[in-house]
Image (spheres, rainbow, N blue to C red):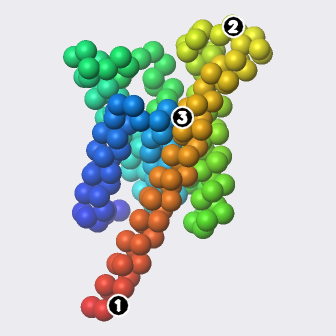
Amino acid sequence: MKINKSILWSLALLIIVAALYRIIPNRPYGFAPHIAMALFAGAAIKDKKWAFAFPVFSIFLSDMLYEILYLNGLSQMRGFYEGQFSNYILFAGITCIGFLMKRVNALNLFGYSLITATAYFMVSNFLVWFNGGGFGRPLTVSGLFQCYTDALPFYRGSLLATMVFSILLFGGNYLLNRQSLQTKIIL
């Protein structure tokens, strides 16, 4: 399958912009485009290898930038850390959820954004708790709920970001496709 060069350049630019956005200092907790990117990739990119590569590469690029900033004393957050591979797997999983979105409409966009942000929150924080990360909560049911409570500011930000960036990605894709159709009709 051949991919349109302008679409490929647009996706490459989006990957870079999203990676740079994620490392902006003092942005709201969890407010990043990557969950929406994974959902969009699964729903809109027909070639599955590109669908998986799109969000995972953007996360990897921003992790690499974080690591460079950390190594140069410009960030307190490491880019590469133990358990990071599971984060990439989670984004691949979100892409798989996007494969299930057969129709793009406002209700599906809202529902899938809610599902993917919530799934990411639940699984990622379970892994943080299970591996002793975060505040090192005890491996008890109470400790798990403490871990989820600790992460609520990130959940709010990621839920809002997923909704906002999903609207931008899916809406932009709709407008580009509509413009492309009108151009073809005129020609």
Distance from the alpha carbon under mark 2 to that under mark 1: 63 Å
**Quarter of the N terminus within the rendering:** bottom left
Q: Secondary structure at mark 3?
A: helix
Q: Which mark is residue 138?
A: 2
- The numbered disc on residue 185 is 1
Residue 126 pos. (x, y %): 64, 23
Mark 3 or mark 2: whose residue is earlier in sequence: 3
Q: Is residue 69 left or right of residue 97?
A: left
Say whether residue 10 is left or right of residue 122: left
Give the image location of residue 176, x and y in percent. Answer: 37, 71
Task: Check the picture and name the quadrant holding the C terminus.
Answer: bottom left
Place of residue 158 in the rendered image (x, y in percent of width and height, measured from the top left)? 54, 40
Residue count near mark 1 (Cα–Cα under 10 Å), binned few <14, some 14–19, many ≥20: few
Secondary-structure class at tag 1 = helix
Work out whether residue 71 or residue 184 is closer to the camera in this orientation and state it. Answer: 71
Q: Inspect the image, locate mark 1, and give the three-letter code of the amino acid beneath it.
A: Ile
Residue flagged by tag 2: what amino acid is it?
Pro
User: Which residue is identified by label 3?
Assistant: 90
Q: In the structure shown, which secondary structural element does the residue marked by tag 2 occupy?
A: loop
The residue under the point 26% across, 20% down is: 74
Residue 93 seen in this snapshot: no
